[in-house]
Amino acid sequence: MAVNLPLLVAADLKPVAGIELGYAEANVRKPNRKDVLVMRLAPTATVAGVFTKNRFCAAPVQICKAHLEAARAGNAPIRALLVNTGNANAGTGEAGLADANATCAALAAQLGCEPVQILPFSTGVILEPLPVDRIVAGLPAAIANLKEDNWFAAAEAIMTTDTQPKAASRTVTIAGKTVTLTGISKGAGMIKPNMATMLGYVAIDAKVAQPVLEHLVREAADKSFNCITIDGDTSTNDSFMLIATGAGALEVNDVSAPEYAELAAAVIALSQQLAQMIVRDGEGATKFMTITVEQGASVEECRRIAYSIAHSPLVKTAFYASDPNLGRILAAIGYAGVEDLDVSKLNLYLDDVWVAKNGGRNPDYREEDGQRVMQQSEIMVRVLLARGEASATVWTCDFSHEYVSINADYRS
Amino acid sequence: MAVNLPLLVAADLKPVAGIELGYAEANVRKPNRKDVLVMRLAPTATVAGVFTKNRFCAAPVQICKAHLEAARAGNAPIRALLVNTGNANAGTGEAGLADANATCAALAAQLGCEPVQILPFSTGVILEPLPVDRIVAGLPAAIANLKEDNWFAAAEAIMTTDTQPKAASRTVTIAGKTVTLTGISKGAGMIKPNMATMLGYVAIDAKVAQPVLEHLVREAADKSFNCITIDGDTSTNDSFMLIATGAGALEVNDVSAPEYAELAAAVIALSQQLAQMIVRDGEGATKFMTITVEQGASVEECRRIAYSIAHSPLVKTAFYASDPNLGRILAAIGYAGVEDLDVSKLNLYLDDVWVAKNGGRNPDYREEDGQRVMQQSEIMVRVLLARGEASATVWTCDFSHEYVSINADYRS
């Protein structure tokens, strides 16, 4: 029951020159589903990523960081990404690192490169050993179907509790040169990215210098995947990767170039679209909420308050019920930890309805106006702090019976 | 469906000399329920309390603080407490303060004291005007039935979404003198006290000097109500009050006296019992969990990790499902914000079952052992950090379909 998430078809997704995608049904956890994905890159490609800050970061995340570091140092550019679903390879200690390395070695041997040129990713259940044999056995099939127009199948291959594949494409013209951007993402629970989301991949066919790409991936993550939450649970496997294949005409070597700003705008817009898709398909979601906190003393305090509202089970269940029990929003603002907040100046809007005025109920607020907005599937919560110029936005969903059902049944 | 919360009867609760209780059915929000409580104190009584740190703290909380300050200053000892349910008088601005003052004035006039000698408390829906007229109209009935053995009715009168009244009594002998302690508490949702819980009242018949009582109420709150969470939502109205009526033989004037330590132990034990009753009756609860984090570098970091586990919707739904999906606990430890945590030394136990060893799955862990513990109604989660001597414990409950139902329907 995703919220206003249009059904994609393969034709919606544009190939990006310089990246081919192939999948397999490898029985990682369940039969008859795509669960292994290989993305092969042109030798000209640069890759940058951001990863979870969870201290229990998964084995593949640790290896990705090391392999990206080696690529930055010079002689071993990244040639392929390998993703499996069904098993997160997290909480698996030394054995997990060996398992992830084994999958890199197997793919490298088949693609004719070094293991350090492979980036591994896993998503699924934590604390269980990775079934290396089944993943390796699936690689020949994935390699056999590598092609540039396989993005739709790739989006399907990375799904876990997602109800729909998530992907988007766009083309932009920068300095007279056409750039194609296509991305995929997955995730529906354990979503409160801290640097990045569960899994997101965006490819562009421009040629982008490594330091520029690293700057861009952080900027895009901060404005997209780092602004969403479903349940406040930061995953052990969050990874967001930006791939510039170098196969197109545009070249960007400097963050101060005018081309950078245009490219960044396009990457950020696509990343926001992919991030919002994750919220729209949040486990059990029936509503999509945009929480905006304005007039703050700092972006940090605005984010704190926005997340406090977005994570409150009481706020989320009130939205699920379409019940304008809006005092719960005030309570969540009050316990957000902004110690010197003067609530007597605070104003709260629900879409265009002015609910709280100077910290109390707006005398002109009518319950039926709140009720009208609460019945919508898309709702804007707007908090005005009256103490500065900073603002922040967080996207989230409601909390339903279905969320409990999904997470009480996930492994079975 | 409270978890192992025995049904009380009135005879379980001992009167405390020097405090009388009276209730009324005042139709604050719903008809035919006790919703106003008056507690009248002996002139010898001292009172101390701790209150929510929510910035949107309710009007009655603000007035309680002012009246307690006046009592400390000297000439106007607290003579009565007034509690209403059904309306929290929070998020109500200046009008809310005037309303709370009006109820104090009405009760003071009927008891023959000053309004500043009354402590007001409210609990219920936020952001709605307090129905002062209905509360005031209920006062004569409450005053008419004031008596010392009304504790059971008092526990009923402060219930909101609670399914059972919560109260406990004990007597202790200190320095050869008998002391009686009786307390009541309420709360089942919006429970993550920050200084105190929704409403808790403990009365003792000892004579305790004001500074000693203030020290004791903080110590008791920190070891009881400040260790529980149901949904992580810190209420606007949390208040925990300790009343020493002075009607008994014991007198304590110094925190370094041996009598203080004995009295404190009794008050803390009773407060823990009342606090745990709140968790056992948590909205929709089917399990009671004790989360203990040991071998930490500081109590603060142990509490952070314990709360991170206790608040994770994914952990709470796994407990609801009796599913040993225990990687979710590792993820919650990992995102608790302890930046330098070395997870490779961490161990996790579920009761006596050693689940994670040195940060990975214990090779000897068997799924059926985890399954056995998860099916219990009382479960201990024990995390060993291997980085110090500090520890902390948090009590919480699981997250069920019923929680969503209760909070999607609460106002209707």
Image: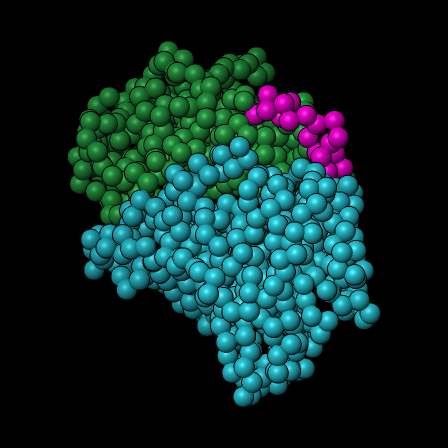
Chain colours: A cyan, B green
Counting from the top left corner in percent of width and height, residue A288 is at 38, 55
Residue A379: percent from the left, percent from the top?
34, 58
Out of B32 and B183, give the one closest to the viewer: B32
The single residue placed furthest to the front in the displayed view is A144
Write the start and end of the magenta stretch as one range: B355-374
User: Where's residue B128, x and y in %?
Assistant: 26, 47
Q: Quadrant of residue A240?
A: bottom right
Of the 4 image quadrants, the one containing the C terminus of chain B is top left
For the residue pair A400 and A78, the one nearer the viewer reads as A78
Identity of the residue drawn at 17% across and 41% down: B133
Q: Image point 34% across, 46% down: which residue?
A: A320
Query: Is A219 or B150 nearer to us in this picture?
Result: A219
Asked whether, in this view, residue A106 is left or right of residue B202, the answer is: right
Farthest residue to the bottom: give it.
A176
- Along the viewing direction, whichever of A273 and B224 lies nearer the viewer: A273
Q: Is residue B372 above or below residue B316?
A: above
